[in-house]
Image: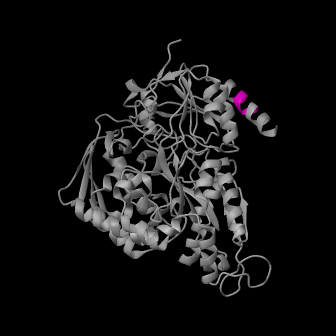
């Protein structure tokens, strides 16, 4: 009843928030939170609003993973990788402007990269370490000189938002800067209303691609959890959302089959992860033991999680190397032969492995302890309101407890959870990693020590020098056979160490309403990933393809 009342209030707030001056208002939900804080710092990983990247700060290029990493040029009109793979040159579009009317030039690009080198905490993709220098060739051309050859460097470079020098040069502390009144380059830069319950983000008056933008404003209502998003979707007040929706055909589509639509495709890897630097010394002893991690993996009933918590939507991932069906073209068959048993649910085998490894109940309290007799007490942390993940953890707690482990769950706010993962101060968690066109990217995002303390995707804080060497070699090769050999080696190392415990590949949760706007990507027209998550730059392409329905 409480959830229903909150949802009703949120939907009512949403309905009253239409800007009088805007003709075409698109209402979306890309984040779930109990309140909005006015923060549009594009470098922020925990506090910035989810509509900051892409919509306020446009990328140089959007790479389309659904079409073999095809480049869609945005602020840049072209790029060229040198034959020796040691440099890459981007050419900006002519006549670009910031939303305040100032010219956007190569100086801003160079400034941004100098800036993140000066303030390393801003470099959330650890790109600076790969760059020898960034130089202005002319007002529209920037050359990135690399420390090592890298055939995939373009994908990394475009992940860093470009900011205006004339604004950010005067910011004393850019890490904590809230950027409440942003000056940006994307299609939606103007904050016309902001409250803790709803905010509105409207057209950039100087947007270079304005002719292709038919939406006047975005409206973001505060919705705290999956049930509230479902209520707004079912009520027809949301146009675009990303959320787990249980029994979606009955709870959403059936309310208005003509207009209520969804399209789910296999995407992000969802995995259990343990912090190998957790402050709890006793847990750390267990978490840094590969036999303990293997036992944890064999205690996860993936199929039940998919069937019950996921309503059958996700795709089970039993690959100890974590790649699974999404990257099957890259799979090394030796992984399954040598380590496949550790990716499958097997309570009996897990109990036997724990026993053999010395994880027994040393103090007769009913729970297993470390081999040295110290207690293990695991808190599985997942964000409040993420109901499918909460259900997945509850299912897992049953088998973990049956095996004799002392396990509980906590559900903090998403921002608190994210910060704990970044810092490594959690115990155990579920975490998601966005899909990519090449498995190099999930590996580098998960295991790069340069990202430790900057990104939640490196939450396990697992280091392996050989993995990093092989990843470097992978980007330095143009030979497909050599790349395959390197990727085969990488998979075997990851599978043997099992630093993360794959569970499933989540579908890309994408729900939309065609009653007010047309032009949506779908299964019949899979032109790009249309998910409105802030981890998907292609959402910008979807926004630009929308047209209002004639009234």
Residue 541 painted magenta: no
Q: Residue furthest right?
A: 1
Query: Left or right: 424 with respect to 485?
Result: right
Residue closer to the observer: 334 or 440 = 334
Query: Which scheme is used to colour this image of the protein?
Result: one colour
Q: Residue furthest top?
A: 551
Residue closer to the observer: 141 or 55 = 55
Residue closer to the observer: 509 or 35 = 509
Residue 11 painted magenta: yes
Q: In x, y percent, where is residue 379?
A: 70, 66
348 up-or-down from 325: above or below: below
132 up-or-down from 69: above or below: below
191 up-or-down from 480: above or below: above
Q: Residue furthest front?
A: 348
Please name the residue shown 47% across and 48% down the image. Answer: 267
- Quarter of image, res 84: bottom left
- Quarter of image, res 193: top right
Q: Which residues are magenta?
A: 9-13
Q: In x, y percent, where is residue 308?
A: 65, 48
237 up-or-down from 314: above or below: above
Quarter that holds the N terminus: top right
Q: Residue furthest bottom?
A: 372
Q: In x, y percent, where is residue 293?
A: 57, 72
């Amino acid at each position: 009843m409480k959830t229903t009342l909150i949802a009703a209030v949120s939907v009512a707030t949403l309905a009253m928030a239409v800007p009088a001056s805007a003709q075409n208002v698109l209402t979306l939900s890309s984040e779930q939170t109990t309140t909005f804080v006015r923060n549009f710092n594009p470098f922020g990983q925990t506090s910035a609003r989810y509509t900051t990247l892409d919509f306020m700060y446009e990328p140089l290029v959007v790479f389309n993973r659904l079409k073999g990493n095809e480049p869609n040029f945005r602020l840049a009109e072209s790029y060229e990788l040198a034959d020796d793979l040691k440099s890459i040159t981007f050419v900006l579009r002519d006549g670009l402007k910031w939303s305040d009317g100032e010219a956007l030039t190569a100086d801003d690009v160079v400034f941004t990269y100098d800036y993140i080198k000066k303030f390393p905490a801003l470099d959330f993709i650890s790109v600076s370490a790969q760059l020898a220098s960034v130089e202005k060739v002319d007002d529209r051309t920037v050359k990135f000189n690399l420390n090592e050859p890298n055939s995939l460097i373009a994908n990394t470079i475009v992940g860093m938002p470009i900011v205006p020098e004339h604004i950010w040069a005067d910011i004393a502390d850019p890490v904590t800067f809230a950027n409440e009144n942003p000056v940006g380059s994307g299609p939606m830069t103007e904050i016309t209303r902001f409250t803790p319950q709803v905010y509105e983000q409207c057209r950039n008056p100087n947007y270079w691609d304005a002719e292709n933008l038919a939406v006047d404003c975005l409206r973001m209502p505060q919705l705290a959890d999956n049930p509230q998003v479902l209520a707004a979707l079912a009520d027809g007040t949301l146009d675009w959302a990303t959320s787990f929706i249980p029994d979606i055909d009955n709870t959403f589509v059936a309310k208005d089959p003509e207009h209520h639509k969804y399209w789910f495709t296999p995407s992000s890897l969802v995995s259990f992860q343990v912090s190998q630097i957790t402050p709890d010394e006793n847990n750390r002893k267990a978490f840094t033991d590969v036999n303990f991690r293997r036992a944890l993996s064999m205690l996860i009933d993936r199929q039940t999680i998919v069937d019950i918590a996921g309503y059958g939507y996700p795709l089970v991932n039993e690959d100890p190397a974590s790649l699974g069906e999404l990257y099957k073209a890259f799979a090394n068959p030796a992984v399954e032969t040598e380590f496949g048993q550790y990716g499958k649910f097997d309570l009996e085998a897990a109990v036997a492995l724990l026993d053999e490894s010395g994880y027994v109940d040393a103090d007769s309290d009913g729970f297993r302890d470390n081999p040295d007799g110290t207690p293990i007490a695991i808190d599985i942390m997942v964000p409040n309101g993420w109901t499918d993940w909460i259900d997945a953890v509850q299912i897992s707690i049953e088998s973990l407890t049956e095996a004799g482990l002392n396990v509980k769950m906590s559900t903090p706010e998403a921002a608190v959870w994210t910060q704990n993962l970044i810092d490594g101060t959690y115990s155990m968690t579920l975490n998601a990693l966005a899909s990519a066109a090449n498995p190099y990217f999930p590996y580098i995002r998960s295991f790069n020590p340069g990202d430790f303390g900057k990104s939640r995707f490196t939450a396990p804080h697992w280091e392996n020098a050989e993995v990093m060497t092989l990843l470097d070699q992978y980007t330095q090769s143009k030979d497909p056979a050599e790349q395959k050999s390197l990727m085969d080696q990488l998979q075997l190392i990851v599978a043997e160490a099992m630093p993360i415990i794959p569970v499933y590949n989540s579908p890309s949760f994408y729900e939309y309403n065609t009653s007010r706007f047309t032009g949506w990507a779908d299964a019949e027209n899979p032109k790009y990933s249309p998910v409105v998550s802030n981890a998907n730059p292609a959402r910008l392409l979807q926004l630009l393809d929308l047209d209002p329905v004639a009234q």
